[in-house]
Image (cartoon, rainbow, N blue to C red):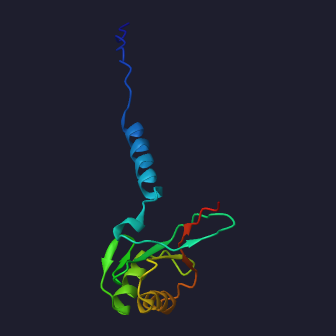
Amino acid sequence: MRFRKRTVEEPEINLVPMIDVLLMTLIFLILTTSFAHESSLKVELPRAHPNKPIKIHGVHIVIDSAGTFAVDGALVAGTEQSIMQALAAHAHGPDTPVIVYADRNAPYRAVVHALDAARRIGLDRIVFATKVRKTS
């Protein structure tokens, strides 16, 4: 009777599933990280006395004292149509909040353009950002 020789398989570690998990974790972390969008333009926010500061995630509109617009960090022309296009590109649906970072010396017309553009594309949740006034 002839017996076959048993071949001994060397143990191996398959790295492909581990690399897949690491890449998916990296993608998740990149997508869920919030970036400071208000730094695209230099603005001096008005001060207020909030009861409790809140953090809202949404589309950020920054308006500086010259009336220049930035939507989520990208400069946008001052026309209502270009603001609407930028908001529509960055919004995740009609319930997406719009956070307005308007310089305290920003032209009133610029703020109205931003509000009107947001409302015309169906974004009704609008929040104005302020600095916390320190009480003494």
Quadrant housing the N terminus? top left
Q: Residue at x 60, y 62 (%)?
A: 134
Nearest the viewer among 9 and 47 is 47
Question: Based on the displayed image, in which of its 4 quarters is residue 71 positioned?
Answer: bottom left
Residue 77, x across and y down, in percent:
30, 85
Image side of residue 80 versus residue 97, left or right:
left
Q: Is residue 69 above or below residue 22?
A: below
Question: Based on the displayed image, in which of its 4 quarters is residue 4 positioned?
Answer: top left
Q: Is residue 103 above or below residue 115?
A: above
Image side of residue 76 versus residue 52, left or right:
left
- Outermost residue on the top side: it is 1
Nearest the viewer among 32 and 108 is 108
Quadrant housing the C terminus? bottom right
Q: Residue at x 43, y 58 (%)?
A: 31
Residue 61, x across and y down, in percent:
43, 77
Nearest the viewer among 45 and 112 is 45
Residue 128, x across and y down, in percent:
54, 77
Q: Is residue 48 above or below residue 33?
A: below
Q: Residue at x 57, y 85 (%)?
A: 124
Residue 2, x across and y down, in percent:
35, 8
Q: Residue at x 45, y 90 (%)?
A: 108
Nearest the viewer among 19 and 115 is 115
- Outermost residue on the front side: it is 136
Q: How many marks?
A: 0
